[in-house]
Image (cartoon, helix red, strand yellow):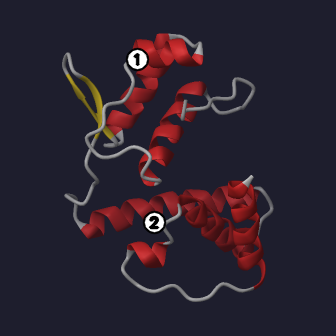
Amino acid sequence: MWIRIDPLAPEPLYRQIAAAVKAATARGRLQHGERLPSVRELARELAINPNTVSKAYAELEAAGVVVRRQGAGCFVKSDDRGRSLEHRRAELTTRAERLVTEAFHLGLGPEQVRSAIEHALGRLGRPADEQAGRGTAPKQGRDQDMDQDTEHRRAS
């Protein structure tokens, strides 16, 4: 199963499910238009209450990640390029500000935040420059070390 949850994590289970679906979509594991497991199927596989899965799906629907079709199930929605670039950038800026605030409270500085973002983009397998149609600059130092560490984990 591609969705993994940790009942001991501080993050609620429904948010873990939503994050897993978002990550699977970003990584290309889930394609646009693909049907998600039914609420009952996923609840049974994860051994959790169906209401938890339903709440996760509702959050994903509200975020525009999935669409529910009456009697047919829940499907990954096509990407959000229908909204204006300006609107998408504003949303990204809001989310980035939240991330930076959280990083500050964790005692992390700007370079550590940049490194973490680059690392996360590398885990997606689709660097930001590549997605935007630009070439990527060679990585040096810590970024290169993090990429090698990621590759080592993927290989094992």
- Front position in the image: 95 or 121: 121
Q: Residues within 10 Å of mark 1 (few under 14, many from 20)?
A: some
Q: Secondary structure at mark 2?
A: helix
- According to the picture, the residue beneath numbered tag 1 turns out to be 39
Q: Please, is residue 3 above or below residue 90 in the view? A: above
Where is residue 71, by image quadrant? top left
**Of callouts 2 and 1, the N-terminal one:** 1
User: Which amino acid type corresponds to the residue marked 1 in the rendered image?
Assistant: Val
- According to the picture, the residue beneath numbered tag 2 turns out to be 93
Number of numbered labels in the structure image: 2
Residue at the far front: name it.
155
Label drawn at residue 123: none
Rounded to the nearest whole Å, what is the CA distance between mark 2 and mark 1?
33 Å
Q: Secondary structure at mark 1?
A: helix
Q: Measuring from the top left, give residue 6's x and y in whole percent.
A: 69, 28
Eye-nearest disc, 2 or 1: 1
Of the 4 image quadrants, the one containing the N terminus is top right
Q: Measuring from the top left, give residue 39's x and y in whole percent.
A: 40, 17
Q: Measuring from the top left, give residue 94's x and y in whole percent.
A: 46, 60
Q: Measuring from the top left, give residue 125's x and y in whole percent.
A: 53, 63
Q: Residues within 10 Å of mark 2 (few under 14, many from 20)?
A: few
- Front position in the image: 153 or 77: 153
Q: Residue at 49% of width from left, 57% of height from top?
A: 95
User: Which amino acid type corresponds to the residue marked 2 in the rendered image?
Assistant: Thr
Residue at the far right: name it.
107
Q: Residue at 65% of width from left, 33% of height from top?
A: 11
